[in-house]
Image (cartoon, rainbow, N blue to C red):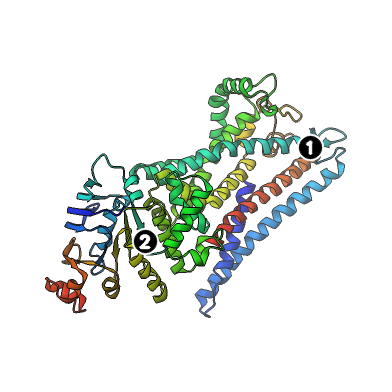
Amino acid sequence: MAKRIEVSGLHAYYGGVHAIEDISMTIEPRSVTAFIGPSGCGKSTFLRTLNRMHEVIPGAYVEGKVLLDDEDLYASSVDPVAVRRSVGMVFQRPNPFPTMSIYDNVAAGLKLNGVRGKSRLDDIVEESLQGANLWNEVKDRLGKPGAGLSGGQQQRLCIARAIAVQPQVLLMDEPCSALDPISTLAIEDLIAKLKNQYTIVIVTHNMQQAARVSDRTAFFNIAGTGKPGKLIEIDDTSKIFTNPEVKATEDYITGRFG
Amino acid sequence: MTSDTGVETRVGAQHRAAGRPISTGRIGDKIFLHAARGSGILVLVIMAAIAVFLVWKAIPALQRNEASFLTAQDWDPNATPPKFGIAQLAFGTVMSSLLALLMATPVAIGIALFISFYAPRRLASGLGYVVDLLAAVPSIIYGLWGLLVLAPHMEGISKALNTALGWIPLFGGDSPGKNSIFTAGVVLAIMILPIISSISREVFVQVPRANVEAALALGATRWEMIRLSVLPYGRSGMVGAAMLGLGRAMGETIAVAMVLTFVPGINLHLLEDGGSTFAANIAKSFGEATDTGRGALIASGLVLFVITLVVNMAARAVVARRKEFV
């Protein structure tokens, strides 16, 4: 069910502000692609164009093409709601629904998709929580509020919620930046496991994390304040971290940036 | 009037508790400290003074009353011997306010949802302004409008409701009219619409962006997002808004007094002419009341004061509870 993403000539805007400029790349199925780059360079904006979450912000719009196995996500006949059902997303801060139990959080997306029947829901909830390496920690308190879990557990709950609907692609926007190192390790292990089933794209500020979890790495940069962000290069992670083509990439990775 | 006083008292008290000043010994700080403390105490003194005044004036009339104050339906405090009870007034007040609440709350929340999540931004701010403006229309205007414009149209609506839903006692009766508790309820509903709507809007604005995006990223439509994220988060806020609206409706005087035609006795058929409320009764009968009559009216005002106070306190408690789990 993992799908290939092909982006060509993509621009994104916030009202009159040109946020990212002319991005083209291919993301292979069943791989992890990491986006790195300085703050404000448009990594997260670009990530949000891949499931049409960018346009949720008032005044924001996108030009260009995003193909998901040959289907253009921005074709006029495509419903953004349907796109978001097949491209899941995990956010920087864990955001379980605060008034819902652990079980209901995981089942929320399933119910939106019309999955009915308690035993069927039970099965998928258990499967998703196991998929997110959270089942053993919460199986005795599925009825308790999701907001009562620790930060790392909440983030894994959000991952379980995202994978419960069996998306084709999983987008992660700095999923570990609000977590301690042990929870971070748990999420990274999980990413390695999920990669067998999903196309994963992760934005991270942590270079070691990009090196650890990803197969391919894309470096984004910005020419100056107010200028749009650009894709500098994308290549195999091992190549980006040892022998990048562009000098700016090397400077950023070795900490000589700016 | 009384409901407003009740709210302000608690708001004032809260400010005092939250912003307890720490004196640095500077003269400016000391002046501010005493001014702030004085204002806070003043509000409590005014509240206490109102309560004492009402009780003081009410007691002599209550002692002369030959009927049961709480259960009698007739209001004849000027007769000899004086006989008066609040049953009819309480019934009219509660029924007209509840009707108003039932009609206004869904519409007000709909307006708030539309302005917050559906309307284009430019339309939203204009619309919000217009809804808030409804609150600024004087109640006498609502009364005139209710009497001259709405009431004539209500006759047909009341008859239709009576025909369709006559098997429900509240909608039953033989002669549905236009100056009924139902009509008063409609006028009140329009009057409390802005307060419920604008408080609900404030609650909706506070829904964390993360919750909204969580739902959208799962592939929720706008309505599904509202159901998943906005309504659970705003539930107690909306309850609080409705209760404040209820408090306002119960205290409303002049619009109700203009719309209702007084007919003695409790009439369960809300579509028929008649009924009265505490506030409307005071406005209508105070002018020609004797000493005992005034005392009786003040006693009824005291009951209204207590009811609105309880409703407001319940509303505040519900709104405050929300803070615990956010």
Q: Is residue A183 something one can see in this rendering?
A: yes
Q: Which class describes the residues within 10 Å of circle 2: few (<14), some (14-19), or many (20+)?
A: many
Q: Is residue B289 something one can see in this rendering?
A: no
Label 1 marks which chain's residue? B
Question: Residue A118: horizontal and vertical position, in percent?
Answer: 53, 48
Write down the residue under mark 2.
Answer: A91
Dividing the picture into quadrants, the one containing residue B77 is top right
Residue at mark 1 to residue at mark 2: CA–CA distance: 71 Å
Q: Nearer the viewer, mark 1 or mark 2?
A: 2
Badge 2 element: loop
Foreground pick, A180 / B319 = A180
Dividing the picture into quadrants, the one containing residue B31 is bottom right
Badge 1 element: loop
Q: Residue at x 82, y 48 (%)?
A: B59
A40 displayed left or right of A129: left
Label 2 marks which chain's residue? A
Write down the residue under mark 1.
Answer: B290
Q: Which class describes the residues within 10 Å of circle 1: few (<14), some (14-19), or many (20+)?
A: some
A189 displayed left or right of B71: left
Q: Amino acid at mark 1?
A: Thr
Q: Amino acid at mark 2?
A: Phe
Foreground pick, A160 / B143 = A160
B177 vs A68: above or below: above
